[in-house]
Amino acid sequence: MDLKVLLATFWTVFLAELGDKTQLAVFTLGAAGKSRLSVFIGASAALVLSTLIAVALAEAVNSRINPRWTQGLAGALLIVMGGIYLVGALRPGAG
């Protein structure tokens, strides 16, 4: 196991999840429900399953497409999405 990759993955996912709609949904379920343990287990299982699917798909794509292309595409998509969000946020009345 590569500890550097493990820690980079942990911090990337942890920081990306802070304040996103998934965390807000879990917060709402935890605040409204009687069993916070059930909410925790359900949310944890969902994150594990979605991560498993992403890793499996990445393996399938990686075996067919050069990883440099997928990294470049992912980076370009993040830049485009960030630009779209930034332009939307800067529009008058978008506040």
Image (spheres, grey):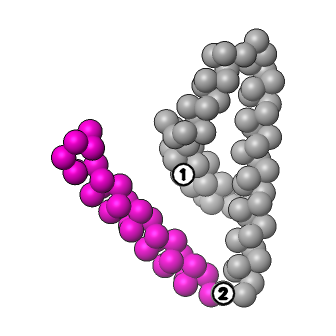
Q: Residue at x 70, y 80 (%)?
A: 62
Image quadrant in which the C terminus is located: top left
Quadrant position of residue 82: bottom left
Q: Nearer the viewer, residue 64 or 4?
A: 64
Quadrant position of residue 93: top left
Residue 26 visible to an observer of this rendering: yes
Label 1 environment density (alpha carbons within 10 Å; few <14, some 14–19, many ≥20): few
Is residue 7 highlighted in magenta? no
Q: Position of residue 35 (x, y in %)?
A: 78, 16
Identity, as a three-letter code, of the amino acid under mark 2: Ile
Is residue 76 highlighted in magenta? yes
Residue 11 visible to an observer of this rendering: no
**Residue 61 - label:** none
Q: Which residue is mark 1?
A: 12
Q: Which residues are magenta?
A: 66-95
Q: Position of residue 9 (x, y in %)?
A: 61, 54
Q: What is the residue that sits farthest to the top in this orientation?
A: 34
Using residue 45 as the reference point, say whether residue 4 is left or right of it: left
**Placement of 4 over or under 39, stated as above or below:** below
Q: Which residue is mark 2?
A: 65
Q: Which element is circle 1 on?
A: helix
Label the magenta part by its dominant secondary structure: helix
Q: Residue at x 80, y 31 (%)?
A: 41
Label 2, label 1: how many angstroms apart (C-alpha)?
24 Å
Q: What is the residue that sits farthest to the front in this orientation?
A: 93
**Placement of 11 over or under 33, stated as above or below:** below
Identity, as a three-letter code, of the amino acid under mark 1: Thr
Image quadrant in which the N terminus is located: bottom right
Of the residues under marks 2 and 1, which one precedes in the sequence? 1
Q: Which element is circle 2 on?
A: loop
